Amino acid sequence: MDAPMPPSMGQYQGEHTKAWTAKVAQFDGYVFVTPEYNHSIPGVLKNAIDFAYAEWNNKAAAFVSYGTVGGIRAAEHLRTIASAIQLAHVNQQLAFSLFTDFENLSLFKPAEHHDAAVTKLFAELEAWSTAMKSLRD
């Protein structure tokens, strides 16, 4: 963070912060895709989230994670962070294993059993994004 005021004050000064918060403000819902590092999300993702505040409020999010155990712990940390910034999160999430959903640990080739979860994730995200919009109008 390189701003003198916390993001919750909405007094953004840096041009990069103004550009980022304007982009975040454009959307009603988000899909966060994260690897799991050291049982959590990478610092760069946490920074990106922390640079904004009101722009996340009363919107919806879904989580897609990956790692040796599917990135589940990273997704759970994102749920806690999302709650703190008043970002509603849907129940359905996607968790991809580096061992079964990636070829040679690098080429993404998800197993077929994820198909139904993908459909459900986007249906939930669309429903929540639509419902949350009434809180912002």
Image (spheres, rainbow, N blue to C red):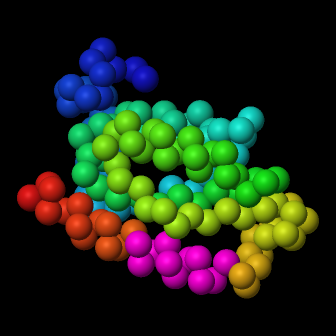
Outermost residue, left direction? 137
Question: Can you tell which quarter of the image residue 27 is in?
Answer: bottom left
Bounds of the magenta segment: 114-124
Residue 114, x across and y down, in percent: 67, 78
x 39%, y 42%: residue: 83
- Counting from the top left corner in percent of width and height, residue 40 is at 65, 39
Residue at the spot 52% in from the left edge and 82% down from the top edge: 119
Question: Which residue is located at x 43 percent, y 62 percent?
Answer: 90
Q: Position of residue 32 (x, y in %)?
A: 51, 56
- The part of the image, by quadrant, that contains residue 123 is bottom left
Q: Is residue 100 visible in the rendered structure shown here?
A: yes
Residue 122 percent coordinates (x, y): 45, 75
Residue under the image location 35 percent in, 73 percent down: 126
Q: Which quarter of the rendering shows the C terminus?
A: bottom left
Left or right relative to 100: residue 4 = left
Q: Residue furthest right?
A: 104
